[in-house]
Structures are given as structure tokens and as C-alpha cells.
Image: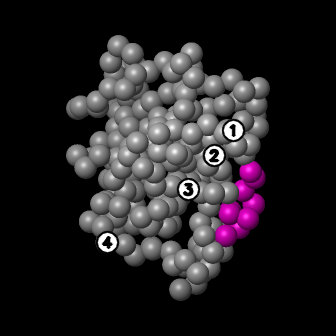
Amino acid sequence: MNARLALLLAALCTAACAPLIPQPSQTGESGLSSSKLTEESLALGSLDEELSLDIPTAEARKTLLGKWYGITRTADGGRKEWLVNRAVDGTYRIDFRVTDAKGQVSAQSEVGFWGVSGGVYFRIFRGWVMLDGMKTADPTDPGHYDSYEVVSLTGESFQYRHIDNNTLYTVKKMPADFTLLVPLDAKREQTLKFEF
């Protein structure tokens, strides 16, 4: 019980200390826009919400399917956004959009395998999506294998902590038609299906 209370307090502190990000007024087909979501809006709710730490593996896997969006500040004062789409076949794709402090936007897409078991979420990075196909990552690089402690998982939000570096991430479940808005000159990739 003390561990749950400590995690809850850490989540609340993270929510209270998260800086706001400016919100441009662009929306996608779903009426939502990644630019309207902020670190604060992704933070966990109040003490009334129960943190789901003991979720069974099969239920956790089913809950994690689909699109999840995250946003954070970068060291230079810009922001990094990501949209991960987890498929039932155990593959994932993450689209990143990074806006630096000067407003320059860059984009990148990565693919790999994912899973969850016993309160641990993991990813195996396999490569980058490029215009001409997939650029395969070096499978011997230990940096391409990540494991995370599941801090909280509901049908609407997912909070997880990197086991090696202790970084805490919070993402929000998004509708199937949600996409990151990326200017054409910054998009160096196209949508490709990941097959391995």
C-alpha cells in the first residue's frame, strides 16, 4: 500500500509541475489535434482515480492496442510529440514530431515489436520507416531493447517508467483517425506497413 501511495504522490507531483505548452488552433478529422494536447492534459487525474497497477497481462495487452499520444518539453525549450500505434500482431510504429525552440519541425518514424507481461511493458526497436522502405536497426545494439514499469494503465491513459534511466512517460489513448500534424517539408517518411 505504501508503494502505491508513493507512486500516486509522484504522479500528482508530475502533474502539478508539468509546464504548459502553447496550443495552436489546428484540428484533424477527429476534432482533436496533437497541438491542443499538453503535458498537463496528459497527466494523471485526481486522488479519486484508482491507479490500475495489478492489471492482468491479457487485459493490459488488449488495453494497449491502438493509438497513444505523448508530449514533453525538450532540453532546448521546444517540444517532442509521439504517436505510437500498437497492433494486435505485436508490432508497433511510433511517429515523432520534434519542434525546436525556433519553431523548426523534424519528423521520424520507427517500427518494432512490443509486449507487456507481469507489469512490465517492453519494446524491441527494429528500424526506421523511410521513403524507399525500411532502414533496419542493428539488432546487436543493446540500446534498441527497452523495458518499462507499468505505473498506471486505464482505457484512457498509460503511464510507464523506463527501468534503466527512470524516465517517466505519460500517454493518452487517441481515436483511430488521429494523426500528428507534420508540415510536408518536414515529413521525410511515408506510411508503410511494418512486416518482419
The reply to whether the magenta stretch includes residue 75 is no
Q: Amino acid at mark 4?
A: Pro
Decide which of tag 1 and tag 2 comes sooner along the chain. Answer: 1
Find residue 106 and report its horizontal and vertical position in percent.
59, 24
Decide which of tag 3 and tag 2 comes sooner along the chain. Answer: 2
Q: Magenta-highlighted stretch: main secondary structure?
A: helix
Find residue 113 and report its horizontal and vertical position in percent.
32, 42
Is residue 73 in sight in this rendering?
Answer: yes
Q: Residue at 52% across / 45% down in the picture?
A: 31
Decide which of tag 1 and tag 3 comes sooner along the chain. Answer: 1
Q: Which residue is mark 3?
A: 170
Decide which of tag 1 and tag 4 comes sooner along the chain. Answer: 1
Please identify, in this view, whether the residue under mark 4 or under mark 2 is nearer the observer: 2
Q: Which residue is mark 2?
A: 36
Position of the C terminus, as image quadrant, is top left
Residues marked 1 and 2 touching at CB (< 8 Å): yes
The reply to whether the magenta stretch includes residue 16 is yes
Q: Amino acid at mark 3?
A: Thr
Q: CA distance from mark 1 to mark 4?
A: 39 Å
Residues marked 1 and 4 touching at CB (< 8 Å): no
Q: Which residue is mark 4?
A: 56
Find residue 107 and report its horizontal and vertical position in percent.
54, 26
Q: Amino acid at mark 2?
A: Lys
Label 4 Cα neighbours within 10 Å, binned few <14 / some 14-19 / many ≥20: few
Decide which of tag 3 and tag 4 comes sooner along the chain. Answer: 4
Q: Residue at 50% across / 27% down in the picture?
A: 108
